[in-house]
């Protein structure tokens, strides 16, 4: 194009008074290194700006985005600066190699065009000079942007398509797991290193023999065998390192089809979440891009591989899902997910076992144990601990204490923000002083030694002050400053009012109880010693407290009924049956050694195991008679005794819960032979002087 012609039309002195911006962009670090030719072309544009009339010192080069991806403007500092300067009317001209690639997406590009048009800024690339305020130029530039985006898309798709096609044919060269190498023609062979080969074979044999990944790790550890791995990055790339076999690696090896000689591709998928986080998803086998069994040599057959998969699946089910760290699940362990091992710092997991119909939790630190097949770090019976945590919460959580805590928290937070600002300013000031000192030092004539020395010392002191201020600032910033936001605050307060009722309500599910604990506690660090258990509780908001519990009792100790209850039962037996005693104990809020409500059979068991005399024996001791005995004594039949008893003519006492009674011996004036007669009031009064009500009795 005729630049001189363009110049006469488009470039005015107004443009030339402003700066010319050269925007240099390469999208990856690799391009920066390898594609120096394009860099040179970009800088050559500078000469064109000079040719168009801009003084060389008015050409601003922006090349800060080198090494950044151009996919979004948000993280590209250089592009932001360009847009800002154009917007402020500082730019007369914007230059770029393929100018539409200034921005990698249309939105960014159109925004830049808009701003250029408003500020009368020209655009220059290798093809020509454009004025975005002119309709034709604007149209052309817009198209260029769209084309460039489309091109990028096509390029990407083509690249991906090429990869997928190759993968479908099993011809894609991807990094191989340990034990395999490529030959010169890209074929996969077993690693010629015999030690590597033998170790891998030994690994799969160990799994076949033991049937579990954990046991395989253990076998390797017991035999002190090391396992090889490739170094993939860094100075030692490509070398083989030997180290202990870990559980996670064992699983990775067992699940990798390549060891069975199968080629596979696309087993997982990357995906961006809404927060722009990259997540990897494992896909089911049907959705893999490619899976080609018997594609190359392997360490086992495809059938062996499938058999291993089946075993691993079974093991996974047997081991249950509560291994993984997780949000509250069903199951009563209060501290599930919150317990931290005070010995090694790992999260502790929960194991449950069932006894007497109750589920008993145990907190276990076993992660490292599983990974390296070592004994577990510590295991702590959870029941007593959970009770103690529950009590602690009930004592701690009152609306008043919470309100105070939150208020103090808020004040602290405000003060922290203030001091933060102050410290930051102190750092800035120290930096400014140091900068000043530096400039003074640089400006002095070196021949003037005395002054120079003094200024250098001053500069050094200023630098020291910067370091000090910076250190103070950092230290203060790292100080504990756990914020409680307004939302959490409201929830915590609402909970406090209702807390004791909810906690005790038997209908409250375990999951909810655990949520309450999580709302109020950050974590609980557990250390078990011979003389007891220490639990360091960290509440939300930073408060801490330490619980010490006596050493966890053995199962039989835990189940033992307290002496208090035994003696109480002993007393109650004087006047009540087992069933009645159970009801009374429950009413007074006692629970059995296993934490259950009492019922007749539990009282019976306790009575027997503590050799308490039965109610029957006690009544007999007091001279009570059986039905037969009293029938003989009164010379009536047993049925009559029952009837008289039922109507209160004979005093009787229940001796068990099946309506069996013992009778008080009749007084000396009880007549013989009353059967079949109607009792007169006088007779009845004689028999039972305290009985005043009317009794109508028909034989
Ligand atoms: Zn531990």
Image (cartoon, grey):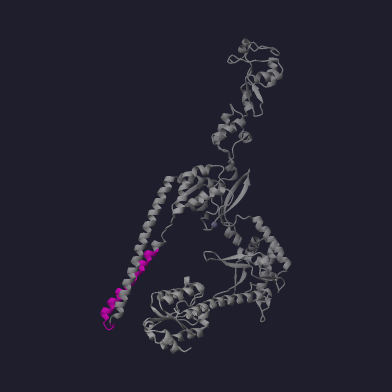
Q: Which residue is drawn at 53% across and 58% down?
A: 346
In this view of the protein, which residue sits in the foreground, 275 or 184? 275
Q: Where on the picture, by quarter, is residue 196?
A: bottom right
* In the image, residue 155 above or below residue 487: below
Taking the view exactly as shown, the residue that stands out farthest to the front is 135
Q: Which residue is drawn at 44% across and 54% down?
A: 486
Q: Which residue is drawn at 45% across and 85% down?
A: 45
* Residue 679 in view (yes/no): yes
* In the image, residue 95 above or below residue 343: below
Q: Quadrant of ligand 1?
A: bottom right
The stretch of residues the image draws in magenta is 445-474
What x and y, as percent, mark residue 203? 67, 67
Q: Where on the picture, by quarter, is residue 446?
A: bottom left
In this view of the protein, which residue sits in the foreground, 39 or 417? 39
In this view of the protein, which residue sits in the foreground, 338 or 267? 267
Q: Which residue is drawn at 63% across and 47% down?
A: 354
Q: In the rendered view, does 165 fall on the left or right side of 135?
A: right
């Amino acid at each position: 194009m005729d630049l001189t012609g363009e110049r006469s039309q488009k470039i005015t002195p107004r443009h030339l008074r402003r700066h010319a911006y050269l925007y240099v962009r390469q999208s990856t670090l690799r391009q920066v290194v390898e594609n120096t030719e394009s860099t040179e072309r970009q800088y050559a544009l500078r000469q064109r700006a000079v040719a168009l009339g801009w003084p060389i010192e008015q050409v601003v080069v922006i090349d800060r985005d080198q090494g950044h991806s151009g996919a979004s403007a948000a993280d590209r500092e250089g592009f932001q600066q360009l847009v800002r300067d154009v917007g402020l009317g500082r730019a007369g001209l914007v230059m770029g190699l393929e100018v539409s690639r200034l921005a990698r997406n249309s939105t960014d590009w159109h925004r830049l065009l808009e701003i250029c048009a408003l500020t009368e800024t020209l655009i220059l690339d290798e093809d020509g000079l454009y004025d975005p305020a002119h309709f034709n130029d604007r149209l052309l530039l817009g198209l260029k942007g769209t084309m460039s985006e489309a091109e990028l898309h096509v390029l990407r798709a083509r690249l991906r398509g090429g990869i997928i096609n190759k993968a479908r044919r099993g011809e894609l060269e991807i990094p191989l797991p340990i034990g395999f190498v490529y030959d010169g023609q890209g074929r996969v062979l077993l690693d010629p290193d015999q030690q590597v080969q033998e170790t891998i074979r030994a690994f799969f044999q160990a799994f076949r023999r033991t049937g579990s990944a954990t046991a395989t790790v253990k076998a390797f550890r017991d035999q002190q065998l090391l396992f090889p791995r490739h170094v993939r990055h860094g100075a030692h790339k490509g070398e083989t390192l030997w180290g202990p076999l870990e559980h996670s690696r064992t699983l990775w090896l067992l699940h990798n089809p390549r060891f069975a000689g199968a080629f596979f591709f696309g087993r997982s998928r990357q995906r961006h979440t809404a927060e722009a986080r990259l997540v990897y998803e494992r896909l089911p086998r049907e959705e893999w891009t490619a899976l080609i069994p018997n594609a190359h040599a392997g360490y086992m057959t495809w059938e062996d591989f499938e058999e291993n998969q089946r075993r691993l699946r079974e093991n996974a089910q047997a081991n249950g899902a509560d291994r993984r760290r997780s949000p509250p699940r069903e199951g009563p362990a209060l501290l599930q997910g919150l317990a931290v091992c005070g010995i090694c710092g790992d999260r502790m997991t929960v194991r449950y076992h069932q006894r007497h119909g109750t589920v008993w939790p145990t907190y276990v630190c076993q992660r490292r144990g599983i990974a390296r097949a070592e004994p577990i770090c510590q295991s702590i019976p959870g029941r007593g601990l959970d009770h103690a945590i529950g009590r602690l919460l009930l004592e701690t959580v009152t609306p008043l204490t919470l309100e105070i805590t939150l208020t103090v928290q808020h004040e602290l937070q405000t003060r922290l923000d203030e001091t933060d600002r102050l410290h930051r300013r102190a750092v800035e000031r120290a930096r400014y002083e140091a900068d000043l000192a530096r400039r003074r030092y640089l400006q002095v004539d070196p021949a003037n030694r005395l002054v120079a020395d003094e200024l250098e010392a001053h500069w050094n002191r200023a630098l020291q002050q910067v370091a000090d201020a910076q250190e103070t600032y950092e230290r203060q910033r790292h100080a504990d400053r756990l914020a409680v936001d307004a939302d959490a605050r409201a929830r915590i307060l609402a909970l406090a009012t209702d807390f004791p009722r909810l906690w005790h309500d038997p209908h409250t599910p375990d999951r909810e109880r655990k949520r309450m604990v999580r709302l109020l506690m950050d974590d609980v660090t557990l250390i078990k010693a011979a003389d007891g258990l220490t639990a360091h509780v960290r509440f939300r908001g930073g408060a801490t407290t330490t619980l010490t519990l006596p050493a966890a009792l053995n199962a039989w100790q835990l189940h033992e009924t307290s002496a208090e209850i035994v003696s109480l039962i002993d007393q109650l037996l004087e006047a009540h049956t087992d069933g009645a005693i159970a009801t009374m104990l429950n009413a007074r809020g006692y629970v059995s050694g296993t934490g259950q409500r009492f019922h007749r059979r539990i009282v019976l068991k306790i009575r027997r195991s503590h050799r308490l005399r039965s109610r029957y024996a006690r009544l007999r001791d007091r001279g009570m008679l059986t039905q037969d005995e009293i029938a003989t004594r009164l010379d009536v039949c047993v049925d009559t005794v029952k009837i008289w008893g039922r109507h209160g003519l004979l005093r009787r006492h229940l001796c068990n819960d099946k309506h069996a009674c013992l009778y008080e011996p009749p007084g000396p004036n009880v007549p013989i032979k009353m059967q079949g007669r109607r009792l007169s009031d006088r007779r009845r009064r004689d028999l039972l002087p305290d009985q005043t009500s009317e009794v109508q009795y028909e034989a």
